[in-house]
Image (spheres, grey):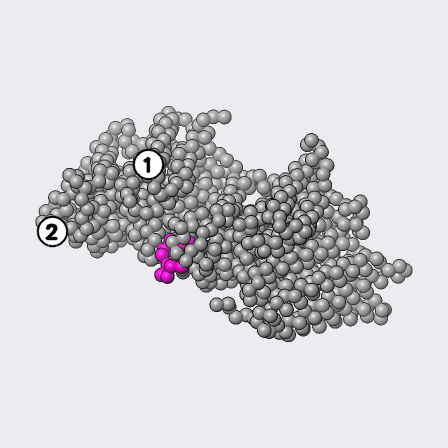
Amino acid sequence: MNWNDWLPLLLIASSLIPGLIIFGLAEQRVRLRTTLNLSGSVINLLLVGWMLWGVYHGQHFETRLPLLPGLDLVLRAGPLSLLFVTLSAVLWLLTTIYAIGYLEGSPHRSRFFGFFSLCVSATIGVAMSGNLITFLLFYELLTLATYPLIVHRGTEAARHAGKIYLRYTLIGGGLLMFATVWLYTLTGTLEFTPQGFLHALGDEHRPALVMIFILLIAGLGVKAALIPLHGWLPLAMIAPAPVSALLHAVAVVKAGAFGIVRVVYDVFGINFATDLGVTAPLAWLAAFTILYASMRALYQDDLKRRLAFSTISQVSYITLGVAIAGPMAAIGGVVHLVHQGLMKITLFFCAGNLAETLGIHKISEMDGVGQRMPWTMAAFTIGVFGMIGAPPTAGFITKWYLGMGALEAGQSWVIWVLVGSSLLNAAYFLPILHRVWFRKPPEHWPEERCFGRQETAWMLLLPPIVTALLALGVGLIAATAFSPLAWAKLIAEREGL
Amino acid sequence: MSIAILYALVGIGLFCLGVYALMIHAHLLRKILALNIMGSGVFMVLLALAGRTEITPDPVPAAMVITGIVVAVSATALALALMLKINAITGRAELNDAEEK
Amino acid sequence: MGDFLLTIPWAVVLILLPLVGAIACFLWPKKVNQLGLITLGGVFLSVVGLGAWLLENGVYHHAVGGWNAPLGIQLYADGLSLVMLGITALVGVAVSVYATAYFDRSQSERFWPLWLFLLTALNALFLSADIFNLYVTLELLGLSAVALVALGGGKAALNGAMRYLLASLLGSLLFLFGVALLYHTYGSLDLAMLSEQVESTPTVWMALGLMSAGLLLKTALFPLHFWLPPAHASAFSPISALLSALVVKASFYLLLRLWLEIFWPISGSVAGLFGVLGVMAILWGSLQALRQTRVKMLVAYSTVAQIGYLFLAFPLAMGAGVTAWNAVIYLAISHALAKAAMFMAAGNLLRFGGHDRIADLDQLAQRLPLTIAAFALAGVSFIGLPPSGGFIGKWLLLEAALMQGRWDLAVVMVLGGILAAMYIFKVLGYAFTEASKPSKVKTVPVRMEWAALLLASGAILLGFLAPLILPLLAIGTPFDAFSGNEEIMP
């Protein structure tokens, strides 16, 4: 028995078991619940750190359990998995702190934190899946674990949002399952392999493979909110702010994008997919999503809705990077998994702070809020600059690599998409900053709560500041060996790009 | 036509008659009777077929019929008891499709 | 000690024990709960014993009283019987524990003997090896099931019971007619003997038609499902759980056995027909479930839909053999666990709020979390979401369909899952919201909540147990007769 064989399972257990215990806790056991939550995420982080070190030095971490005749449940920690796992682990810790502060005194917290942990376990499972059936398993588990979070408030609107969310995701899941089984009947294996496992298949299967690719992308595109499959996302904003933050930055949307990366690289293989002619349409779809969603964002007055459309647009950078099919662009796309996560979660934390502290939900109410909540708004500003792609933030690194990659692959039209999107990002974000910093604050805020000398509770303030600093930091240290960018390069190298 | 075949045909006839009656009559007693007639039809077929060996009749079908009759009697008893209950509650010995409010 | 255990004729114990228990419950009505639970415990252990025997020695044969076929009664058990017996015992134990809290004194005095008779019939059915015995067990099963439905006592329950009785008797008589024809042709009642002799003659065709029709009626396959929703929805909840989870499966099992042993060489086109009816059942049952406003009716229609899946195996088995059969057995046992759990959960809702109107479920996710969790977990298995037994079953079935290019069936399977999700989450969604008019609430005994939850968790757990259960199912290779095309199987 080897420790490395069980580490991936242990990693999932470190968030799953606290979650299950929390379900059984009475509502008023606040301290025990907090301890469980935090110790779970700290253990999680330690395990991730160990595995990062191990993978960097070429070790293998793989758990394999039989599931069906000929099919195993495989959890494997490769470089790509660990990128996503690290992101989840870090942001889970921060979001947990934030959620504890955000939900203080509100009802049903045991249920909330239980599903929250379940959600993170599912995300980690998605990240570490070593084959398509394992991926499917955790992907659907994620759907189920997020539903109670979306309807958490128990209002009629929440129930409606939950219904729409399920309608999209379960149909997506159905397509995914269909395609997966189809693929299995053709190949007899579903194991993720660098450069894919399909190129050995005969030419007569090509039409079927194209169809499978379309079905897979449709199934994954629902969660990745590719247009026109994005309809659930703005509605899901009804959920409490920590949930929106997690949904957008890490869990659901990213799981979809990550799935697309997996399908293109490890199921079809980028060369084979290009050969099949399916990557170009995917790139167009991603580009269209980027531009169209930015356009829609322009017209939203509700802050969280504007951020939601911005998410739709930003996540498609990942898809775009993958679909351009060059090593540089791939690095840009993959690293955006982390960059977008850090930046977007900052923005959502800040939006939550505004709602919780001052009762602000709309952009038109944000006049002069920078004077009342300077730290929150400073974090927000960093996030915004990242989104626009201003150097030296994380967003700039992404766009630089995407642009270079597009030129390298001879697809210069992508540059125009990037420019257009940056302009649109500026157009819908900069006016907010203008309001925040340069307009006069109103006499009264909609619903102000007092937190003594601080602008808001420290548990609400700390997470956005940390994530903002991280978003700035990963841009500044991009050239060093410890940055996400360096890791993305490692991924590209090990994937044999 | 041998006696056995005649018995078998009559049995089939009874069975069909029973199915028909079961379908068209609303009154529960008639439905229960129809089921009994169907049962008798099947038993006749079974008995008739017992005579297919020329010399000694096959004992197995007779055993089956006796078991079958026992089962039919208990089923009929249960059905009649149910019918009486329904009659006591609704005042009619018929199936009532209206949803209970 | 181990050797001694292996010498006990477990199959006989499995039939006699619940029978004796039932009679004991009649004789000592004061002690029904204890007697019943002891019996169930014994039955459960006997299944384990039989399982151990089968693993050691392969197929089990027992001639009762030393009389061999054709005159004596033969008992027979292979992997398929074992799995069905096991799931019966498991669901039985859970329902029994639930029932001890659910029924009051006088109700439980009537419930226990009937339920133990039902269990006797079920066990005997899964162990019988000749077609006349199967008829008798089928009749016993029907009669005790009808009596259980009638226990409800209200107008709806009595009506449901009567309808059920008429359908059930008609089904048994059709079956018996088929038995008569087969006996006439081959002079034998033993399944194994028949399977060696059967050939395609008009008489056999007629027997096939009659027996299949009778069993389809009892299994409530669309369009013969009309009796099921009223009977299952109006009975007491633990009884609904038993009927939907086990009784319907028993007639399906019987149909499966007949096909595997006798009819498979002659029945290609009928298999296609079964497939079509299965498809209609999935779609019609799901749509009807979606239209219901009461939880129990919804759950009952979901049974109609889920039965449809079981029949998809018949057309698929022609080309995919064992995979298709494994798939339906897996679906059947997951459905048994999940459906029993779901009916118990519905019973808890009824007990709690005094009604089961879906739109008025008042914040139950918070007030009755274990029950709602049970409902949700069971629902996950119906939808076929991983990880659950339903997922494994659906995966295998989908694999069998796509392997031979049956796109139509594959699409229906996926569609059925989505429809199931719609009706399950219709209930769950309302469990989170506040009702417009709050109703008075009663407490639900903890035992009832946990029984439902544990059973539902079992359905989820089945999602990880395929490597254990599929080999068990292969004992005595019950599906070998059907997989004439071994080249597909690895």
Q: Residue at x 10, y 47 (%)?
A: A438
Where the C terminus of chain C falls, by quadrant? Answer: top right
Classify A403 as above or below C297: above
Q: Chain of mark 1?
A: A
| Image position of A96 (left or right of C373) | left
Classify B30 as above or below A225: below
User: At label 2, which amino acid type do we have?
Assistant: Pro
Asked if both marks, 2 and 1, belong to the same chain, the answer given is yes
The residue labelled by disc 1 is A31
Please check the rendered image and state whether residue C438 is part of the magenta-colored stretch, yes or no: yes
| Image position of C441 (left or right of C222) | left
Q: Residue at x 48, y 53 (%)?
A: C348
The secondary element bearing badge 1 is classed as helix
Q: Residue at x 73, y 66 (%)?
A: B39
Q: Nearer the viewer, residue C379 or C91?
A: C91
Where the N terminus of chain C falls, by quadrant? Answer: top right
* Residue B70 locus on image (x, y percent): 75, 60
Mark 2 or mark 1, earlier in chain: 1
* Residue A123 locus on image (x, y percent): 38, 41
* Local crowd size for mark 1, using a 10 Å CA cut-off: few (<14), some (14–19), many (≥20): few
* Residue A278 locus on image (x, y percent): 38, 48
The residue labelled by disc 2 is A442
